[in-house]
Amino acid sequence: MIEISPRSGTAFLMKRGERLRVVDPMGEQVSDLICFAAADRREALSPGRTFDYLSKLLLTTGDALYSTESRVMMRILSDDVGRHDLLLTPCNTETFRIIYDDKNPHRGCQGNLQAALAAFDIDPRDVGPTFNTFMNVTIDGETGRIEVKPPRSKAGDAIVFQAEMDLIVGLTACSAEQSNNYSFKPIRYEIL
């Protein structure tokens, strides 16, 4: 099992049929996941297409993640938590300036993903929305207001994805305080 240090990220290749197991080793830690088609790096994960085709906001076991080209990129095979987010974009320096009034902002998950994916010739401008693994975002049914709450994941909880095409995958140990209940921890993963 490979460990991603707190507030950092990585990128790697997955072949069709391989499985990715993402583990929260200590609990309450979010991991941003993005993927691109290995054959066409402009084809990327699309939360909008995923919402359209599944007609739901909360994904779990059996659900698919769709691409900008309306193709299934990954499928969730198992899920210990059942609460993840596809609404919010990866945190970046502006997130820390605007939400946290941080005068020395971290580059966030977006910057971590951009740096890691550069090795695969992914244009930094193409690093967009992510599947925010273990992130707990609630929506008020009356006002539509969203709220980031502590992740429901406990130590050792995991989610397993299966690649439905050859992929380039970016993965982080999220850097945003609010997303991780104000504590930064590692994320672990393995390709099966």
Image (cartoon, helix red, strand yellow):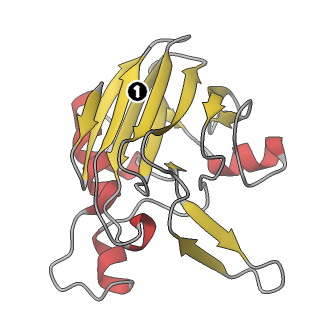
Q: Nearer the viewer, residue 160 or 70?
A: 160
Q: Amino acid at mark 1?
A: Ile
Count of numbered badges drawn on the protein: 1
Image quarter for residue 123? top left
Task: Tell me: 20 left or right of 110.
Answer: right
Q: Nearer the viewer, residue 170 or 62?
A: 62
x and y percentages locating residue 1 in the rendered image: 30, 24
Image quarter for residue 118? top left
Farthest residue in the left direction?
A: 104
x and y percentages locating residue 142 in the rendered image: 84, 84
Q: Nearer the viewer, residue 118 or 76?
A: 76
Tell me the quarter of the image containing the C terminus. Answer: top left
Q: Which residue is mark 1?
A: 168
Q: Residues within 10 Å of mark 1 (few under 14, many from 20)?
A: many
Residue 55 is at least partly visible in this image = yes
Image quarter for residue 49? top right
| Disc 1 secondary structure class | strand
- Residue drawn at x 50%, y 13% is 18
Residue 99, relative to residue 107: is it above or below? below
- Residue drawn at x 56%, y 17% is 165
- Residue drawn at x 61%, y 61% is 87
Q: Nearer the viewer, residue 14 or 71?
A: 14
- Residue drawn at x 40%, y 27% is 168
x and y percentages locating residue 84 in the rendered image: 60, 52
Residue 180, relative to residue 118: is it above or below? below
Task: Tell me: 47 left or right of 140.
Answer: left
Residue 82, relative to residue 164: is it above or below? below
Residue 121 is at least partly visible in this image = no
Farthest residue in the front direction?
A: 155
x and y percentages locating residue 109 in the rendered image: 33, 56
